[in-house]
Image (cartoon, rainbow, N blue to C red):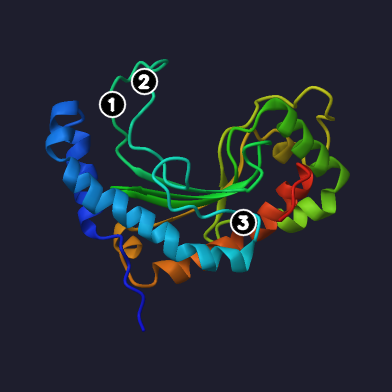
């Protein structure tokens, strides 16, 4: 039986309109649309994907909960931001490592936004101690890092993204052959696809395959920060 994808074009339609009407009055008037077209489908996708994710790793969670689960809240934290728009204009789903509450651990992420749909594997903005662990692992296990990193590039559809230092980090040899990787501040591989692809019945298979493709990076990073994968 063909899987019925809960993600529909209505999700992207709502988010487009929200971008043009990012205020409390409009959102409250359209909250049922948000619940029906964005939140409920995202939670259903998380629930449906859970058993598939377990085939890749038993240590990464798919939790179909609106609070404390894999689905990010729509409300922005504007306390320290110049942008005071109250709502996010995308739907974010983060499949976190089971130990993510205790350590900065790698995970998988699905981003659903009009004109920008992507899937990522790895670790984004880790703290300084975690960064040092990962950089140290690249130095100590250079061959393993090169093997893991070789899975990501233009030919694979997955590419490394994120910020990097302009200069080598303190305590690391600037002449190391992997210094450009050591300078990374984010260790995440990203692949992009279309809104149409996100609404197709093949999405569950696509996400399963993307997690498998992200596994070499996830495995290296998990070992680097001393958590299982």
**Disc 3 and disc 1: Cα gap in Å?**
36 Å
Q: Secondary structure at mark 2?
A: loop
Tell me the quarter of the image containing the C terminus: bottom right
Please name whichever residue, 221 or 104, is drawn nearer the observer in this view of the structure.
Answer: 104
Q: Is residue 12 visible?
A: no
Contact flag, marks 1 and 2 (Cβ < 8 Å): yes
163 in relation to 110, above or below: above
Do the residues bearing badges 3 and 1 touch, measured as CB atoms within 8 Å?
no
In space, the residues marked 2 and 3 are separated at their CA atoms by 35 Å
Of the two numbered discs 1 and 2 on the same chain, state the one appearing first in sequence: 2
Query: Disc 2 or disc 3, which is closer to the eye?
Result: 2
* In the depicted structure, whether residue 111 falls above or below residue 199: above
**First in residue order: circle 3 vs circle 1:** 1
Which residue does the numbered mark 1 point to in the structure image?
86
Q: Point out residue 94 in the picture as x, y percentages from the top left corner.
A: 49, 47
Above or below residue 122? Residue 204 is below
- Quadrant location, the N terminus: bottom left
Q: Which residue is mark 2?
A: 78
Left/right of residue 159 with respect to residue 166 in the rendered view:
left
Residue position marked by numbered label 3 in the rendering: 152
Image spot of residue 134 (x, y percent): 75, 39
Mark 3 surroundings: few (<14), some (14-19) or many (≥20) residues within 10 A? many
Numbered disc in front, either 3 or 1: 1
Q: Alpha-carbon neighbours of circle 2 within 10 Å: few (<14), some, or many (≥20)?
A: few
Residue found 30% across the figure and 53% down from its top: 40
Residue occupying image coordinates x 36% and y 59%: 44
Going from N to C along the chain, the mark reached first, 2 or 3, is 2
Residue at coordinates 83% horizontally, 48% vertically from top-left? Answer: 142
Where is residue 70? Give x, y as percent. Answer: 47, 48
Examine the image and state in which quarter residue 163 appears.
top right
Of residues 188 and 21, the one drawn nearer to the viewer in this rendering:
21
- Which quarter of the picture shows residue 7? bottom left
């Amino acid at each position: 039986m063909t899987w019925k994808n809960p993600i529909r074009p209505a999700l992207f339609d709502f988010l487009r309109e929200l971008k043009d009407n990012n205020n409390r009055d409009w959102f409250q008037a359209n909250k049922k649309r948000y619940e029906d077209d964005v939140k409920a489908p995202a939670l259903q996708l998380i629930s449906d994907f859970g058993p598939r994710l377990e085939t890749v790793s038993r240590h990464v969670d798919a939790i179909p909960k609106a609070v404390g689960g894999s689905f990010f809240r729509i409300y922005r934290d504007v306390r320290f931001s110049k942008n005071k728009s109250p709502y996010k204009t995308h739907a974010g789903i983060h499949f976190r490592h089971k130990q993510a509450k205790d350590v900065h651990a790698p995970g998988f992420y699905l981003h659903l936004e009009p004109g920008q749909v992507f899937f990522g594997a790895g670790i984004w903005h880790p703290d300084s101690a975690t960064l040092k662990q990962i950089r140290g692992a690249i130095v100590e296990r250079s061959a393993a890092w090169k093997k893991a990193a070789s899975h990501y590039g233009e030919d694979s559809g997955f590419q490394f993204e994120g910020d990097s230092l302009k200069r080598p980090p303190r305590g690391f040899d600037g002449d190391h052959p992997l210094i450009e990787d050591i300078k990374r501040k984010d260790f995440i591989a990203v692949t992009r696809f279309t809104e149409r692809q996100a609404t197709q019945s093949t999405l569950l298979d696509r996400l399963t395959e993307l997690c498998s493709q992200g596994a070499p990076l996830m495995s290296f990073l998990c070992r680097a920060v001393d958590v299982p994968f």
